[in-house]
């Protein structure tokens, strides 16, 4: 089955700096890669996603890049703000009728004011 | 337009009791997924249901756990004879499509077994 690895497990940046979170996946048939933000005591919230026919997608301060050959994808957050502090999860979904997501273990992002 | 509604938010059960977790998907979503999250872990897939059908239960323990999504009413995740190891946050998500794009998660039910 699919295996998603996420590195590093914690990341601390200064407010205003950029943050990059990387994930790798194992199943070359995976074709959908969402990123979720989870704040304490809340459910995961979808922040951006990318499908395998696209190499990059951007939404304001957030961007995601996908390298299908290397089987890795990354989340980029620019001009970080304290409210970006949260746990971020990457996930991958297999092709065909398999619509379950396999998640990485998450990374705790801390933005220092 | 309410999101995915889960209740209760917190549930405390003694060992051996039953836990029933409810999930109402977003309006217009007929695909429901249940995930379990242990402390400092990612979410683990448990089961995928459509109305009146279990599509994929490959992540659900064979014993004590069951799920349903009836024609009317919410989806139910049922855990019988709970043990301490069942303590976790249980999240439900719904999607409007078979492909599962754009999952929306609920706020979860935090189950504590004492």
Image (cartoon, rainbow, N blue to C red):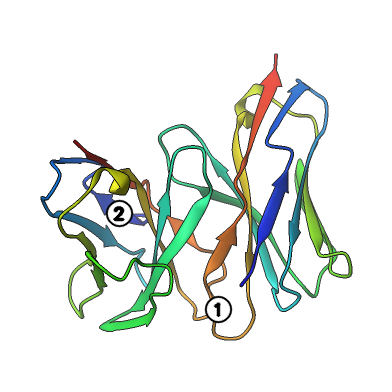
- Is residue B48 visible in the rendered image? The answer is yes
Relative vertical location of residue B109 with respect to residue B54 in this rendering, above or below: above
Q: Position of residue A72 (x, y in %)?
A: 81, 59
Picture quadrant where residue B13 is located: top left
Closest to the observer, B19 or A81: B19
- Within 10 angstroms of label 2, few (less than 14), some, or many (20 or more) residues? some
- What is the x, y in percent for residue A33? 68, 63
Q: Which residue is mark 1?
A: B99
Report the Cα–Cα distance between label 2 and label 1.
Answer: 21 Å
Is residue A83 depicted above or below B20 in this figure?
Answer: above
Q: Position of residue B87 (x, y in %)?
A: 30, 43
**Disc on res. B5:** 2
Q: Residue at x 88, y 64 (%)?
A: A70
Dot 1 falls on a residue whose secondary structure is loop
Sequence-first tag of 2 and 1? 2
Q: Is residue B69 left or right of residue A2?
A: left
Question: Could you tell whether B22 is left or right of B43 in the image?
Answer: left
Say which quadrant the N terminus of chain A sits in: bottom right
Residue ID at (35%, 76%): B49
Chain containing mark 2 = B
x, y percent for residue A94: 63, 75
User: Looking at this view, is A23 or A26 the one in front?
Assistant: A26
Q: Secondary structure at mark 2?
A: strand
In the picture, the quarter occupied by the C terminus of chain A is top right
* Residue appearing at x 45%, y 74% in the figure: B96
């Amino acid at each position: 089955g699919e295996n998603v690895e996420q590195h590093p497990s914690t990341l601390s940046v200064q407010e205003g700096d950029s943050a990059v979170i990387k994930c790798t996946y194992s199943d070359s048939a995976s074709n959908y890669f969402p990123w979720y933000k989870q704040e304490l005591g809340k459910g995961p919230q979808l922040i951006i996603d990318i499908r395998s026919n696209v190499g990059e997608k951007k939404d304001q301060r957030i961007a995601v890049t996908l390298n299908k050959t290397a089987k890795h994808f990354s989340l980029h957050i620019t001009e970080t703000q304290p409210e970006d502090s949260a746990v971020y999860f990457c996930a991958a979904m297999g092709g065909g009728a398999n619509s379950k997501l396999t998640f990485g273990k998450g990374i705790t992002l801390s933005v220092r004011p | 337009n309410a999101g995915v509604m889960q209740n209760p938010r917190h549930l405390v059960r003694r060992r051996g009791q039953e836990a029933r977790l409810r999930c109402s998907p977003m309006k217009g979503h007929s695909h429901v997924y249940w995930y379990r999250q242990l402390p400092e872990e990612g979410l683990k897939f448990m089961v995928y249901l459509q109305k009146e059908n279990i599509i994929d239960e490959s992540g659900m323990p064979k014993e004590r756990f069951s799920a349903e999504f009836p024609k009317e009413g919410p989806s139910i995740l049922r855990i019988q004879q709970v043990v301490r190891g069942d303590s976790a946050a249980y999240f439900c998500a719904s999607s409007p499509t078979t492909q599962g794009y754009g999952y929306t998660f609920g706020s979860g039910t935090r189950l504590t077994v004492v």
